[in-house]
Each structure stands twice: as structure tokens, then as C-alpha cells.
Amino acid sequence: MSQTVADSHIDGLPAPRRYFAIAVLLLTLVLVVLDGAIANIALPSIAASLHASPSDAVWVVSSYQLAVLVALLPCGAIGEMVGARRVFLAGVALFTLASAACACAGTLPMLVAARFVQGLGAGAVMALGVTNLRLSVPQRLLGTIIGINAMTIAISSAAGPGLAGAILAVAPWPWLFAVNIPLGIVVLASGPVLASTEGVARKLDGRAMIASALMFVLFFLGADRVAQSPVTGGLLIVASVVCLFTLLRIERRSATPLVPTDLFGAPAFRFSVVASVCCFTGQMLGLLALPFYLQHRLGMATTQAGLYMMPWPAAVALIAPVSGWLANRVKTACLCTAGGALLAVGLASVGLLRAGPYGASFIIGTVIAGLGFGLFQTPNNRVLLLSAPKARSGAAGAMQGTARLTGQTFGAIVMAIVFDVVPLSSAPEVALVLAAAFAGLAAVVSLARVPHEMAG
């Protein structure tokens, strides 16, 4: 007989198995989130090695993000239906195999295709990671583990370029993907330590899954083409909107829809999703623009640029635990507003001010941006995930990842558009100012949540 996620493992796994499970889940989360950002610093090297233009090379990043977007919502639903552990480990296996294909790719199309498959596996991991965490810990520790999960995502997202620079200092770019293989094997071998569930009785509508995939693919293909071919790009975006309305119509009577419209009824969930999209758009634009700023504007080598990228993740690592502590004591909307504002100020200062001797203003600006990013993400993701009931944790986790990847993919596509319409000599600065605008918008959306928290 099937059982609900809410009924199974209500008190979590016993110690010490619980701690091994948490370690495995967080290691896997670090792996897939890092891989979404780790290629950023290597894009100039990859473009030169594979004889590709900068705008084409951006698809090494955006194809991964797009695949995760396509996979997140269906994997969240499948995980609720057949069991979170099964789908999670299947995603790890696919991610590991695709990492090997990325390391062996000899052309840009091969690399982009392998990255897409890698993203499909990462989507399963991201969608079911939260569910597996919630099954691993007792109810009294749920808020703490959700905060640690959010902190891990924030640090991993920011640390990717710096870690990539360290790897590139001693090895060529294929090693950025080859390092995933042994870690993936370790996670697969540790799979039995995770909580096992039978899933819930629900049906998956194939029409809804197709409409969801087409919605994301058409939108981002349209956004990518809108600068070069406004008519074609516009038509693709309109088609994606039609897919969205079709999806909502298909699922209008579903109690557990693929797009969790049932969860959007809660203001905390709704505002957190929108703010997350805006924040991650600004983050990805910034992290894509900064390597080109350092290497083309300041004339740094890849290794030196990687070192200059490190203050951002260092600042995130410094502030994220503090942010988690504050989230239990201060209104999270206020924390997120302050974080978004700091991120905007840091990105704008790098884009608008001269770097100065030894890149002083660059370092100060990225430290401010990192502090803002870490201050925003931990409380925002914590509110988003805890505002959903445990039985819908698969949908909440999928929506968290969807919001993050929507922002990051959109940021990557905006960066490609900037490269197409702005000279390379000034494109990074323009992108950084746009990134600051999106971060500021995240702060404004978070500020709108304050009255709801005060009323609560």
C-alpha cells in the first residue's frame, strides 16, 4: 500500500544514519549547483579552445540551466509519486555520465549537448533534495536543515567561478567536469543511507509535462533570438505564453498540479519565488560579466581572474551563517530587502566605478555583492520551502530550483544579448549595471512582503 510523504519517516532517520544522509545530500547539492556556475570563469578559454564566439559559448552555461528548468517540475512530481530516493539517485547517475561526456567533448555543439543532459540529471537532484532532507530529520530540526540547505545553495552558487579558477590554474577546462565523476560515484554508492518511501497515489498528465517543457524551451529560445531577429524571438515568446496558459488549463482541476499553483496562494511563497527569480538573474549576469571584465577590461590572465573572483564567495560564506541566525530573530522580508539592496550596490559600483590600483574598487564591490547575496538567499529560500506542507515538499523544492534556474538562465541569455548588441570593450560594464537593476528589483519585491509578515 502506498503512503504519503508526510506519514513516512515523520521523526526522521535515526542517528548516526541521519547525519550520513544529510552529508550525502548536501554534497550532491553542492556538486550540481557548483556545476551550474563553474563554467562561467572558463567561458573565454572554452570559446578560444573550441573556436567559438563569446555569445555562442554562453550556451555552455545556459543549456545546463535550461535543462534543469525543463526537468525540475516533472521530477518533483515523479519523486512524489514513485519515491524521492529513486528519482534522486537516477538523477545523480545521469549527471555523472553526462559529466564524463562533457570532459570528452571536442566541439562546442557536443559540449552544449552533454551539458543539457547533465542538466536533466541535476534537475532531478535539485527537485528531490529538499524532500530527502525533510525525510531525514525530525520535525524539530526542520527549520535548521532548511536554513543549512539554503546556505549551501547560496555559497555554492557564488563559489563556482573561484573554484573554477583554482582548477584552471593546474589543469585544462575539461577537468572542470571530470572532477564530478568520482564524487558522483561516491554519492551513488552511498544511496542506501537515504530514506526510502513508496510515494503517493497521483497521476502524471503527459500533456502537462509536454506543455511545461515547451514553455521553458520556447521562452528562452525566443529571448536568445529577440535581439538578432525581433519577429522570430517575439513569436517564440508568445508561443511560450500560450504553453503556460495551456498548462494551467490542463491542470485547473488537479489537487497536485505540476506548476504548484496551490502553493502560490500563500503570499510568503509567492513573493519569495518572484524575488528569487530577480536576485538570481542579477547574480548570473554579474558572475558572467565579471570574468570578461577582468580578462578583457583589466587584462588579467584566467588564473589571476579566478583569484579576483574569490572575494564574492568568501563574503557569502561569511554572511550566510549569520543570515541563518538572523532569520530566526528578524523579519525575513527585512533581511531580504537589505540583502538585495547590498547586492545591487556592489554590482553597480563595479560597473560604474574605475577599478583603481590593484582592482581595489572591484574587490570592495564584489565583497558588498557577496554579503548582499548571502544575506538575501538564506532567509528567502527558508521561507519559500517552509511555507509548503511536507506532503508538497517535492513541488516546493522543484519550485525553488525553478525560480533560481529561471533567473540564472534568463541572466545568461541577457548576457548573450548584451554581447550581441554592445561592443566587447563595454559589454561587461553594461551587464553589471543591468545586474544591479535586477538585484534592486529583488529588494523591492521583498519589501512588499513586509506588511504580510507584520500581519502574520
Image (cartoon, rainbow, N blue to C red):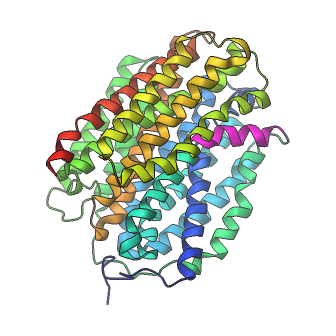
Q: Nearer the viewer, residue 203 or 440?
A: 440
Q: Residue 74: horizontal and vertical position, in percent?
A: 38, 59
Residue 327 in view here: yes
Residue 401 in view here: no
Note whether 334 is above or below 286 in the view shown.
below
Q: Residue 379: horizontal and vertical position, in percent?
A: 38, 49
Q: Which residues are magenta?
A: 156-169
Residue name at image x 49 percent, y 74 percent: 86
Q: Residue furthest front?
A: 329
Image-quadrant location for residue 391 = bottom left
The quarter in which the N terminus is drawn is: bottom left
Residue name at image x 20 percent, y 55 percent: 250
Q: Is residue 306 magenta?
A: no
Residue name at image x 63 percent, y 30 percent: 57
Q: Residue 22: horizontal and vertical position, in percent?
A: 54, 70
Q: Residue 433: horizontal and vertical position, in percent?
A: 47, 17
Q: Nearer the viewer, residue 293 or 381?
A: 381
Residue name at image x 51 percent, y 23 percent: 347
- Per the picture, the main secondary structure of the magenta-coloured stretch is helix
359 vs 288, left or right, is: right
Q: Is residue 163 magenta?
A: yes
409 vs 54, left or right, is: left
Image-quadrant location for residue 100 = bottom right
317 vs 151, left or right, is: right
